[in-house]
Amino acid sequence: MRRVLFILYYFPPSGGPGVQRGLKFIRYLPEFGWQPVVLTVREDAAFPVRDASLMQELPEGLIVRRSYCPELYGAYRALTGRRATQSLDITSQSRAEGGLRRRLMRWIRGTFFIPDGRMGWLPFGIRQGTRMIRDYDCQLLFSSGPPFTTHLIARGLHRRTALPWVADYRDPWTQATFYPSRPMIARRIDLALESSCIREAERNIVVGQTMVDEFRRRYGELDPERFVIIPNGFDPADFRGIPHAPPDQLRITHSGSLFGNRIPELFLQIVEELIEQEEGFADGVHLCFAGRLDDDMRARLRRPPLDRVAELPGYLPHRESIRLLRRSSLLLLLIGRDAQARSMVTGKLFEYLASGVPILTLGPHDGDAARLVERTQAGWVFDHEDGEGLRKHLLNLWRTYRDRDTAARSRAAKTDATEPAALFGLHPDPTEINRYDRREQARQLARLFDASA
């Protein structure tokens, strides 16, 4: 069993989608000949969200060492008055964030937090990682970002030890939708850091086709084989013992953070109109937004008439989040309007697919996420500007759900993943969906390690 040093910031007790990819790789890689040992930050780090229940998913005997990480974001929040649950990983700021002091702090963040607010971890991570390589005879390095400080730690260890290094990009660094506004010099420094990491890593893993195309275009002089796609996915084990439980109302659920340009203004406007115009709509529809929300979004949902149908449970532990998906009638997937958003395929989409619940996607048809929904036949996609089409479709979905008889509702409670979708005339392709099983993705990663070591 060969050992690989995993360098991860998001690791239990951190919660959120950034944890799942590394955690599942760690769980299944030993089946394919690689034993991870983990370098991460201390348990009291300033994670945006925490989920202590994920500690129970760590494999028995897993070697984990935690090093100190000075959290610049903690000072940033204190000076700007932002709550710990408010995201700092976004470009678009809430309209409530005006004022000279906050504009100044955003400038400081964009100018000095390079590549991100976890850059203080760099010397401590390299020091601890060097010890781990020696103590556990690691034969390969693996880092996953964001935060991209993880890649700088891996680069430092690679230069010290000459060990092969595989870098995993869940988002595309300087091209990410959350990339902050930076002065020219700061941006050039960040671009240089990104370039050095991409060029020095043996392989660069990305999560989608648009992202790999962009990397290959920007680094056209490198061998295209150095850029590899391993998408996000889902673990079937997470869904065992959680049956479908369709509610009496048409329950529309969005799971995950919601900030900036992904706020669904058109969708909310249509729901408001239907509440006012369609008798029984408010009683027959329920909106649930679980996760961290933009302040403007939270305020909007608490105002009439949306307050009659909206629920805001906040961040939920992973198991509870899956339970919420399985007791929903419809899942809402929101894709941003900017060009970078087309490459985003969030981890929650794959758990949406695994849930067997239909997916209503709002965003461009040419985005990677929208194409995946259409390819798996798991739902519908509407452009941001297609208000009339979205209104008709939402109204039809409500009427279809309202008019189901008791027998149909009973059949929907079966655990067959295609049953809830079939109620709306959908027939998801299980072969296509099962391509995103986390165990299969660990197999792909192990093959990549074999070729790189």
Image: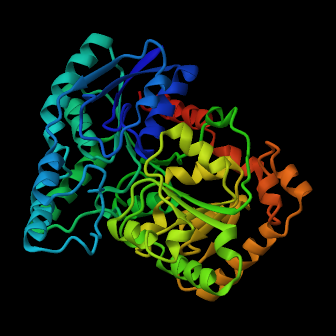
As drawn, is 42 to the left or to the right of 176?
left
Q: In the visual, does 284 lie left or right of 290?
A: right
What percent of the width, then of the height, locates residue 311? Answer: 52, 60
Residue 325 seen anywhere in this rendered image of the structure: yes
Q: Position of residue 274 (x, y in %)?
A: 63, 82
Q: Give the left or right position of residue 146, taking residue 306 as reference.
A: left
Residue pictured at 60% horizontal, 85% vertical: 276
Query: Which quadrant, please, contains the C terminus?
Result: top left
In this rendered view, identify the residue nearer to me: 272 or 29.
Answer: 272
Q: 363 or 360, which lies in front?
A: 360
Percent coordinates x, y for residue 246 in the rendering? 74, 53
Q: Quadrant of residue 388?
A: bottom right
Which is more toward the observer, 380 or 204? 380
Above or below residue 168? Residue 219 is below
**In the image: residue 435, left or right of residue 53:** right
Measuring from the top left, give residue 228's x and y in whole percent.
48, 47
From the viewer's side, name the closer residue of 450 and 207.
Answer: 207
Residue 51 in the image: above or below residue 312 = above
Colour scheme in the image? rainbow
